[in-house]
Amino acid sequence: MPCAESVGGGAPGPPGPPGAAATGARRSAAPLLAVCTGYFMVILDVTIINVAVPVVGRDLSASLTGIQWITDGYTLVFAGFLMTGGALGDRLGNRRVFCAGVALFTLSSAACAFAPHASFLVAARLVEGLGAALIVPGSLALLQEAYPAPAARARAFGLWGSMAGIAASAGPLLGGLLVSTVGWRWVFLINLPVGVACLALTLRYVASSPRQSERALDWPAQCAVVAAVALLTAALNEAGRRGWSDPAVLAGLGLAVAAVAAFVTRERFARSPALPLRLLRSRAMSGAAVIGLLFNFGFYGMVFTASLDFQHQRGFSALKTGLALFPAVAVTTFASVLSGRLTRRTGDRPLVISGMLLGALGLAGWAATGPESAYALLVAPMMATGFGTSFALTGSTATVMGAAPPAYAGAASALFNTTRQIGSATGVALGGSLLATGGDYGSGLRTSMAIGAFAYLTAAALAWLCVPGRAETGTH
């Protein structure tokens, strides 16, 4: 019997032998474990490198530009090729592309670990970003295939979403531990056993995915998406360093807009579009994608600015900063599990709205504190923001995936994750600009938190308009 049938939740069969239920439960959890392991590995690599970069630069005699590319190169390729990864998954089968991504990511991590010089490390990081772009779109599509029952799917999406918050906040903590004990190369070596385990679990427990081999890849559209996202991400990264009025930043933003226009024009006339415009006109899909952009903007903007505040203003070490951020991530798993269970009773809309309102309350609470506020006063706002973001992620993910036909599951997942990456990059860039140019560091920090709170309130209003209610989704 294929794995997809064993985890699906269809009609019950005849009683099995003793222990069959326990075995079924293990098999039911195995696809979730496989997919979440791969996703966790990808997001961890975004943040774990930040603590190691100064040591890497000294060890490999890297220039400032080389150090920047060690971090930014991965993010640029990852964000730029997400739509291509989703299209390949739909055409070739999501499991096949997911496994290829895990293998590529693992091998390139090994190359990073044994890099003899900075240029080699940068090249390996670019390949690692490509592997990540193949992993992430397929992860959501595989969960949708493995858990067709709405309640099981909601729980799976919730736990998948919590992996991002856990990995993002655990990265600095784990990176600090590894760099201070066994060396920076273990920041990459740690991916090897995780990648091998993920690949073995996926091949053993995740069923083969359907293929849409008759659908040609729309390469002009894919190139336009890569250009748009790469240019936008690069411009946002540079805005944090150069300022928003810098000619290079403005040129990057302008070219990104031109690439988006080229993509829309191409998709309007393409015989086999990468992402049909009728899907983008879906209020549920486009609205939930924008909600994902807004809450990533708020959450990762908070994590970035809080990290700078803890290290530069309060004198925390990298390890102590990771511990200080831990309350924000500790609640995410609980929030995702709770929202996955509640969605059967309430539907997605109330959960997304309440999560966004709680996130707004958390950041507004931080913005209201004084410039020399004690760390203890910031714990509750951080926890509220982390809880609210994770609480809303389950419903917004389910909304995007539910609005897409099965043949475009990979493309829908890629769209959602692309908008979230753009939100993260924008939040980090804006937070960095406010801290660097505000004159008063504390005022810049509070302004950043206030803008993040407004983003959460905007997401709550969008959820009211765009996320289907219980009656519309038919959730039981």
Image (spheres, grey):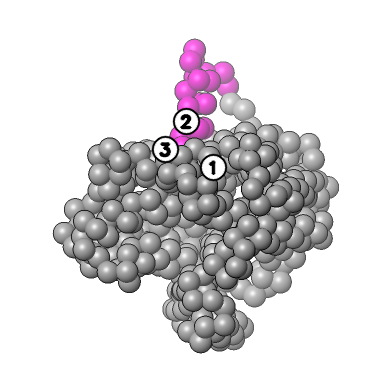
The residue singled out by tag 3 in the image is 205
The quarter in which the C terminus is drawn is top right
Q: Which of 433 and 33 is in front in this view?
A: 433
Residue 95: give x, y in percent of width and height: 42, 51
User: Which badge, 3 or 1, comes first in the chain's sequence?
Assistant: 3
Residue 190: give x, y in percent of width and height: 30, 42
Residue 18 magenta-drawn? yes
Q: What stretch is highlighted in magenta?
A: 14-34
The amino acid type found where label 2 is placed reads Arg
Residue 12: give x, y in percent of width and height: 62, 28
Specify whether 282 is left or right of 309.
Answer: right
Q: Can residue 316 be seen in this view?
A: yes
Report the residue at 57% width, 63% height from top. Answer: 435
Disc 2, disc 3: CB below 8 Å? Answer: yes
Q: Which of 279 and 357 is in front in this view?
A: 357
Residue 116: give x, y in percent of width and height: 16, 59
Q: Nearer the viewer, residue 438 or 270?
A: 438
Query: Label 3 to label 1, Cα distance in Å?
Result: 35 Å
Q: Is residue 142 above or below residue 223?
A: above
- Please tell me the numbered disc located at residue 27: 2
* Secondary structure state at the residue bearing disc 2: helix
* Secondary structure state at the residue bearing disc 3: helix
Q: Can residue 200 be seen in this view?
A: no
The amino acid type found where label 3 is placed reads Tyr
User: Which badge, 2 or 1, comes first in the chain's sequence?
Assistant: 2
The chief SS type of the magenta part is helix
The residue singled out by tag 1 in the image is 325
- Neighbour class for label 1 at 10 Å: few (<14), some, many (≥20)? many
